[in-house]
Image: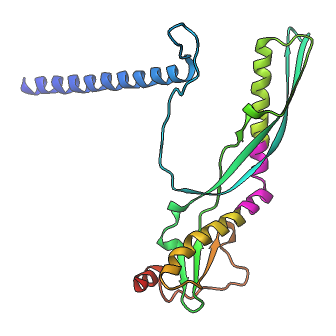
Amino acid sequence: MADTVKSGGTRWFFSLAMLIGLGLLGFLAYNQYIERYVPTVDDGGDAVTQLVSARLSGASSLKVASMTGTVQSSATDVRGFGWLRSDQVIKMPYSVDYFVDVSRIGPDDVEWNAKTDTLIVNAPDITVASPNIDEAHRTMVETTGVLVTREAGEALSQQASQKATSKAQVEAGSPERIAQAREYARAALSRLLAAPLGTLGHGNARVIVTFPPERRRANGERWDMSRSVQEVIGNGQ
C-alpha cells in the first residue's frame, strides 16, 4: 500500500513538473511572438518607434577585417495571373566582418623557438559574419510596373534584400577575400601577441601566425621546441 502511495506521489510530482515546463515554454513562445510580430502602440493607438528588446552578451572573437562596398540587387514580382508585373532595382551600402575566435587558441596551439626567438601561433581559421545590408541608406531605388500594389512593393523589397545579402555573402566567402582576411588577421594577432612578449624581454621576437590550410610546411621544417611558451613566460616573470 505504501509503495502504491509512493508511486502515485512520484507520478503526480513528474506530472506537475511537466505542466510547469510546458507552461514556461508556452510563456516564452508567446513573449517571442509578441516581440517579433505584435506592434507596440501609444495611448492613442499609434505605432511608435522604440527598442522592443536589447540583449548584451560577451564575445571572445577578435574582429580582424571588414569588407564594405555597394551592392545592386534586382527583384521581380508577378501577380494578377501574369498581368501585373513589377520590377525593382536597388543599390545600397553593405559590410561584412571577419573574426578570429582567440578563445580557441590553447597551449597546444602555441610553439616557442628558443634558438630564433620566434613564437609560432596555430590559430583557428577566420569566420565570416552575416552581411549587414544598410537599407536605410539606399543610394538608388527604381521601381517599374503598370500597377505596383502594396503587397507587391513589400515582396519586391524583401526579395531584393535577400538577393543582396546572398550576393555579399558569396563575395565575402570567396577564396580571394578569405586570403585577404587571413593576412589582416595575421597582422592583428601578431600585434596582439607581440606586446606581452615585449614586456617579458622578448621585444625582438618574431610572431608567426598560421591558419589551418597552412599547417603543412612545404619544406618539412620543424621548429625547435626546446622550451614551451609557458616556460618562457615563467622565466620572464
- Residue at image position (46%, 20%) is 30
Q: What quarter of the picture does the N terminus occupy?
A: top left
Going by the picture, which residue comes out furthest to the bottom?
A: 115
Q: Is residue 23 left or right of residue 2?
A: right
Above or below for 207 versus 53: below
Q: Is residue 42 left or right of residue 1?
A: right
Query: Residue 122 placed where, x, y %?
Result: 59, 71
Q: Is residue 115 magenta?
A: no
Query: Which colour style is shown?
Result: rainbow
Query: Residue 75 placed where, x, y %?
Result: 84, 27
Specify the quadrant of the image occupied by residue 49. Answer: top right
Specify the quadrant of the image occupied by residue 16. Answer: top left
- Residue at image position (50%, 30%) is 53
Q: What quarter of the picture does the C terminus occupy?
A: bottom left
- Residue at image position (79%, 49%) is 171
Above or below for 194 versus 66: below
Magenta-highlighted residues: 168-181
